[in-house]
Image (cartoon, rainbow, N blue to C red):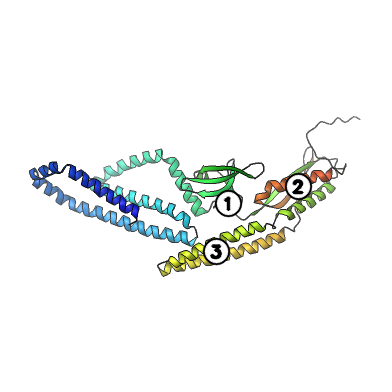
Amino acid sequence: MKNKERGFVIGIFLFIFFIVYSFKNQLYLHLVENYSLVLEELILWIPKLIIIILIFVVAYLLRSFFDSLIKQYFQYVGKEFEYKSASSIVKYVVWVIALIAALAVAIGNLGVWITSMGLVGFGITFALQKPILNIVGWVTIMFNQTYKLGDRVQMGDVKGDVVEIQVMYTVLDGILPNTDEPSGKTITLPNELVLTGSVVNFTKSGDYLWEELSIQITYESDWKKAEKMLKEIAFKIVNKYVGNSSHETTVVHKSFKEMIFALNKSHSQAKTRHERELIEGRIKSVNSECNRYKIIHNEIVKDKKKEPIVRVELTESSVGLNVRYLAHYKFLKIMKSEINTEFLKVIAKYKSISVAYPHIQIVRK
């Protein structure tokens, strides 16, 4: 047993010993006066005690078995820091079930006990529905990989980078909604939001995503020239920000190295051949992921040379120029701002292009 469990068991025995010692005289008189009845009760309780002991032994073996499986799984995926949270949940669930089973054996009337426990369980579930939803949300995050540490996510109106994932909540490093710059705020969100709301993950498939910008010009403007200028400006800005971040590559490579180091450490501490084979398979998988990232990154560097696409849209009072371009998730607002700024600077030199805005124009015949 671990130290905490051993201390818990010793505490229970000491408590029972204290109770028995405090009432030893009364117990002794009771035993002497009702010797035959007590003996009959003890004989009837012997099978129940054996079953209760077996229940707790089986519970301990199951807890150890599931703990070993969970440890192997998190070692395999390289997330040892999440092992303790999952292990504690399994431990409490197994011991609660064992305690309920032991009480059912001790009381004897299983039907009444199940009915009572059902009502009590319903009451507890109703009272603790939020914590239960948070735990279920945490399990969903862990196994469905909704997001992981370092991802940029948005839940409702809250946007930030994930810095910590606990059983009950997720901690975000907040960013400003209009500029995507760090706000210095630490935001704590309950995990139930994964189940009850929408989650936008900006980095689920990588650091790059497609962004769109719409600019409205008047019908009297030279839309062909405006389309060409917008495409050139967007290409210039994309070429500046996409695929040229050496810091981004360094951070990704560092995370891969840290994961491989943790797996090699677990491999050296593995006690069985099966564990070592699992960890070796995970090391190969991480190496292949690292190579895949290098290939994707090189392809993105090539793709950035592709010209952004500009779509022309006709509206009631303007010509819409919608440009689609590749952007890094950290520079979405910056890139959009620079494209708008450059476009305004360029069209200021031409009288043939004007930005559309709501106004009234009187035309006289």
In x, y percent, where is residue 224?
84, 48
**Mark 3 secondary-structure assignment:** helix
In x, y percent, where is residue 67?
39, 57
Q: Amino acid at mark 1?
A: Asp
Crowding around mark 2 (Cα neighbors within 10 Å: few <14, some 14 to 19, many 20+) is: many
The N terminus: image quadrant: bottom left
Q: Amino acid at mark 3?
A: Val
Q: Earlier in the sequence, mark 2 or mark 3?
A: 3
Whole-number angstrom distance, CA of label 2 to CA of label 3? 38 Å
Whole-number angstrom distance, CA of label 2 to CA of label 1? 26 Å
Q: Amino acid at mark 2?
A: Ile
In x, y percent, where is residue 172?
55, 46
Does 72 sit left or right of 333 as displayed? left
Does 134 sit left or right of 205 as displayed? left
Q: Look at 65% across and 57% down and name the residue there.
A: 247
Q: Is residue 262 above or below residue 340?
A: below
Does 349 sit left or right of 183 as displayed? right
Give residue 151's mark: 1
Q: Nearer the viewer, residue 333 or 116?
A: 333
Q: Earlier in the sequence, mark 2 or mark 1?
A: 1
Q: Look at 50% across and 67% down and name the residue there.
A: 281
Residue beneath label 3, please?
A: 286
**Callout 3 touching callout 1 (CB < 8 Å):** no
The answer to whether residue 250 shows anywhere in this view is yes
Residue beneath label 2, please?
A: 339
